[in-house]
Image: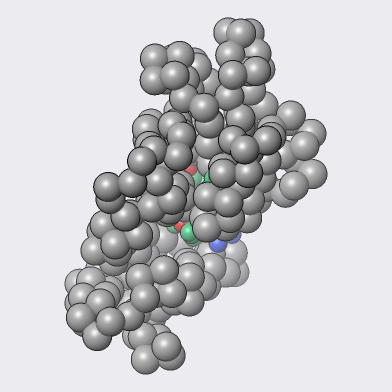
Amino acid sequence: MSAYQALAEAVINGDDKTARAITEKALAEGADPLALVNEYMVPAMDEVGRRFECNEYFVPELLLSARAMKAALELLRPLLVKSGQQSAGRVVIGTVKGDLHDIGKNLVAAMLEGGGFEVIDLGVNVPPEKFVEAVREKDAQIVAMSALLTTTMPSMKTTIDALKEAGLRDKVKVIVGGAPLTEKFAQEIGADGYSETAPGAVALAREKLAA
Ligand code: B12
């Protein structure tokens, strides 16, 4: 599908109108929505990150690229989410306290919905007590946490500790993800599982509920 390389370029250039237009065209031509995300959009954000690291891009460029990514995702999200299935389980998801990155979290939420899960999205900058409250109120079986900053990763452990203190840790499976995380980190903080990708999150959630 190298036909849609222009979509990657539109995300890299922060051009939301073009990103949206190419996505519309691609869908009209029968492109696979997940392939558009995985083959063009995610690699494009990686390139944006690389440019940021070597001071070619600064925060305003990141924001424009994020806006372009969101514009395209708005069109793709309903297609990633199949409707009318019986709930595979209830998931509370959020980006942890201090962290405002939500593109990956939104993808994971959409994929989980597509996989038949009922998803309660708490948004970004979610403090531990908000996760706890949502698990209690919504009677969730899974807590999914996302972090993109090394400085906010510890909030995942704080949230797990808060679940323990509230007596809810044994009732939920905790899964974690985000670019700076590793399997090892997930184990160290006492999470039940880690996945590097959004489709992997669905397989992981299913596996944990079956266990
Ligand atoms: C876009 C972006 C932003 C945007 C975010 C917009 C938004 N609405 O999300 C804005 C401009 C706001 C931003 C701000 C900042 N950012 Co920023 N940002 C990025 C960038 C370029 C892309 C992130 C992204 O969306 N990737 C695409 C998605 C699809 O990938 P993902 O999030 O990793 O998600 C995938 C997996 O990780 C996984 N996953 C994600 N969550 C979960 C959860 C579960 C449960 C599971 C199983 C899986 C899973 O599935 C997803 C799909 O496959 C990254 C660079 C990078 N390459 O990561 C830097 C980056 C994360 N940012 C960085 C920094 C430093 C900042 C700022 C501090 C900059 C500043 N000086 O102000 C601020 C912090 C703001 C805050 N408090 O959060 C650094 C972090 C460095 C570090 N070591 O911590 C990075 C790595 C850039 C860099 N190379 O230096 N940023």
Q: Is residue 70 or residue 160 the one in the foreground?
A: 160
Quadrant of the drawing holding the N terminus: bottom left
Q: Residue at x 52, y 55 (%)?
A: 198
- Say whether residue 18 is visible: no
Q: As drawn, which residue projects farthest toward the front?
A: 86
Q: Is residue 120 left or right of residue 206?
A: left
| Above/below status of 32 relative to 199 | below
Within the image, what quadrant is residue 168 found in?
top right
Occupied quadrant, residue 73 = bottom left
Say which residue appears at 44% left-offset and 19% top-offset: 139
Q: Which residue is painted at 48% across and 70% down in the image?
A: 38
Residue 3 on image: x %, y %: 37, 91
Return the residue found at the far top: 166
| Residue 17: image location, x then y, percent | 20, 72
Q: Is residue 39 left or right of residue 80?
A: right
- x, y (%) of residue 147? 56, 42
Q: Residue at x 53, y 68 (%)?
A: 46
Q: Is residue 207 above or below residue 120?
A: below
Q: Is residue 27 visible?
A: yes
Location of the C terminus (image quadrant): top right
Q: How is the image coloured?
A: one colour
- Towards the viewer: 137 or 102: 137
Q: How many marks?
A: 0
Task: Judge whether 146 appears above or below 164 on screen.
Answer: below
In the displayed structure, does residue 211 sit left or right of residue 36?
right
